[in-house]
């Protein structure tokens, strides 16, 4: 066998998508046996750089050196041949096949596939790497964390000596993150190198030796973990220190303004997505719904928006039964919404001003005609108040994610709703916009609204919530006061490992 050299150097790598410079003369090097973080905000260019290394994109210019030799990587096959493996953010396993079949897929052997021998080979190899997987399990029966482990193993099975992991922790609960880090350390002790992509400072500090920070497509620098701090990394990542938002202590809370009782909702395929879900949100509190993606959050959001009709159960707003209300009836009853997909919250072809008037057109109509002057004045006011970088006449689809989200906030919050439903409100936003959105949600709480925060970002849930309800397989499996909740306990609940039957009753 050829000795696999696995030091990697990327020199002056540049990649454009049209006018956008996704990687701008980036230098990056990976030493043998190190775990090296690629840190940066959303859109910084991390995935692009690694897709180039893995042969999924071609750089416009620059070079890649692997083990001292210039490398031409035109496809993942080339990368794998050089001992480079990548686990992307979207898994590639076939759900209906077993672990063995998935791992063996596309391997030499072809028609001569011998299931018994393949199974044994997979089991032996997994044991050698210390990776716990069941070769016979059907992938569709595995948790997300287990699937990820299979993906990692698949790369190792193909003799990867360099493992690229693109935001692997995004889909994991805290306990699974610990297991992943253990696995990475074990692989490192066997001499493998890992490129660990993340935008979370505590994670890169926990597991990496060196950290390269990307900002706006450029390498902002590479530092040793032992010689840096989270503060310095934050500054490199966003160009300033992040302060985050801090909520003041719990406020006097009033009546439940939003009450969900025994909600039963079917998903698109007719399976129960919410199985008798109950909670309430009081005036002056943020109730966070924590959970791993796909446990009913989307259906809950849609049911509360009036776009998915419950089969059973009740939804009450300020005491009124609105279980079967339409989206506009809900809005009229004082429910403000930040939808999960901000592009679905706007009409891209319409202007910012038109979008800002969209949910309450009756306020902008006189004698059956749209009052364009009032629509424009309303937009000017909200653009200033919410610091939206746009003109009233800009088509809304041209706005950045942060500005589009501010427009959605402006529309929902300017009417002072008594209930605010925010679904994944900062997903994909940069740090500045994230802080802004979080601050606005706390403002709503402080003026006495009931705020429901549905978020897959546990840090966000912990930072904003007064109480935290954990959703698992369509049910609330526990409700905790903020002071009693920590990442570990929430993680247990989120993984279904624990149910707190006697939640808080008050
Ligand atoms: N296939 C693509 N086509 C057009 N633009 C892209 C493509 N992939 C990424 N981009 C853009 O390149 C920039 C960097 O993206 P990406 O590498 O995914 O960042 P990160 O992984 O750090 O979040 C972003 O502005 C993104 O929108
Ligand atoms: Mg990415």
Image (cartoon, rainbow, N blue to C red):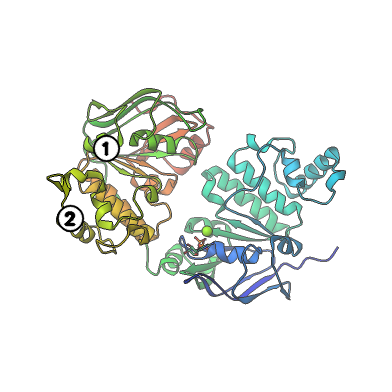
Q: Which mark is residue 8?
A: none
Percent position (x, y) of residue 430?
A: 40, 60
Please tell me whether residue 122 is drawn above or below residue 45 in the rendered image.
above
Percent position (x, y) of residue 198?
A: 52, 58
Residue 419: which quarter of the image? top left
User: Residue at horizontal 34%, vertical 56%?
Assistant: 404
Quadrant of the rendering where the C terminus is positioned: top left
- In this view, the residue farthest toward the top is 312
- Residue on which the image places disc 2: 372
- From the viewer's side, name the closer residue of 333 and 424: 333
User: Residue at horizontal 28%, vertical 64%?
Assistant: 390
- Residue on which the image places disc 1: 328
- From the viewer's side, name the closer residue of 390 and 214: 390
- Quick check: 56 left or right of 375? right
Mark 2 residue's CB less than 8 Å from ligand 1: no
- Quick check: 434 left or right of 383? right
Nearer to us: label 1 or label 2? 2
- From the viewer's side, name the closer residue of 276 and 383: 383
| Mark 1 → mark 2, Cα distance in angstroms | 21 Å
- In this view, the residue farthest toward the front is 368
Please tell me whether residue 48 is drawn above or below residue 153 in the rendered image.
below
CB contact under 8 Å: marks 1 and 2: no
Provide the secondary structure element on which disc 1 rests: helix
Res. 427 visible in picture: yes
Residue 290: which quarter of the image? top left
């Amino acid at each position: 066998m050829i000795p696999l050299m696995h030091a990697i150097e990327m020199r002056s790598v540049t990649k454009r998508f049209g006018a956008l410079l996704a990687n701008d003369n980036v230098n990056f090097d990976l030493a043998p046996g190190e775990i090296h973080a690629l840190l940066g905000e959303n859109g910084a260019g991390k995935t692009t750089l690694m897709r180039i290394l893995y042969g999924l994109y071609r750089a416009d210019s620059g070079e890649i050196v692997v083990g001292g030799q210039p490398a031409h990587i035109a496809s993942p096959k080339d990368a794998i041949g050089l001992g480079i493996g990548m686990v992307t953010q979207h898994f590639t396993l076939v759900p209906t096949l077993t672990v063995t079949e998935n791992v063996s897929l596309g391997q030499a052997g072809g028609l001569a596939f011998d299931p018994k021998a393949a199974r044994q080979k997979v089991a032996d190899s997994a044991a050698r790497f210390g990776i716990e997987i069941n070769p016979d399990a059907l992938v569709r029966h595995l948790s997300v964390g287990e699937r990820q482990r299979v993906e990692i193993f698949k790369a190792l099975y193909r003799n990867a000596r360099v493992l690229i992991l693109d935001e692997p922790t995004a889909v994991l609960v805290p306990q699974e993150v610990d297991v992943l880090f253990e696995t990475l350390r074990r692989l490192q002790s066997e001499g493998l190198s890992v490129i660990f992509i993340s935008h979370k400072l505590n994670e890169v500090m926990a597991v990496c030796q060196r950290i390269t920070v990307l900002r706006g497509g450029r390498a902002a620098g590479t530092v040793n973990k032992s010689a840096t701090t989270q503060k310095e990394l934050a500054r490199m990542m966003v160009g300033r220190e992040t302060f985050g938002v801090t909520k003041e202590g719990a406020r006097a809370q009033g009546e439940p303004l939003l009450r969900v009782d025994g909600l039963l909702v079917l998903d698109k395929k007719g399976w129960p997505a919410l199985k008798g879900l109950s909670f309430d949100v009081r005036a002056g509190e943020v109730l966070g719904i924590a959970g791993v993606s796909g446990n009913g959050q989307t259906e809950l959001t849609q049911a509360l928006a009036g776009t998915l009709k419950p089969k059973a159960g009740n939804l009450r707003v300020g005491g009124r039964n609105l279980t079967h209300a339409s989206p506009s009836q809900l809005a009229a009853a004082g429910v403000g919404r930040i939808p999960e997909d901000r592009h679905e919250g706007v009409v891209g072809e319409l202007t910012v001003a038109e979008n800002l008037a969209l949910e309450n057109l009756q306020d902008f109509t006189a004698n059956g005609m749209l009052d364009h002057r009032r629509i424009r004045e309303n937009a000017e006011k909200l653009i200033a108040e919410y610091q939206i970088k746009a003109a009233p006449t800009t088509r809304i689809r041209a706005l950045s994610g942060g500005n589009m989200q501010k427009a959605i906030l402006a529309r929902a919050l300017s009417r002072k709703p008594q209930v605010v439903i925010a679904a994944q409100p900062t997903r994909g936003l940069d740090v500045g916009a994230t802080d802004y959105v979080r601050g606005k949600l706390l403002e709503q709480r402080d003026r006495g609204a009931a705020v429901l925060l549905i978020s897959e970002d546990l840090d966000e849930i912990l930072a904003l919530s007064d109480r935290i309800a954990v959703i698992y397989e369509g049910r609330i499996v526990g409700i905790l006061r903020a002071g009693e909740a920590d990442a570990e306990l929430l993680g247990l609940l989120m993984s279904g490992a624990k149910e707190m039957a006697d939640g808080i009753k008050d």
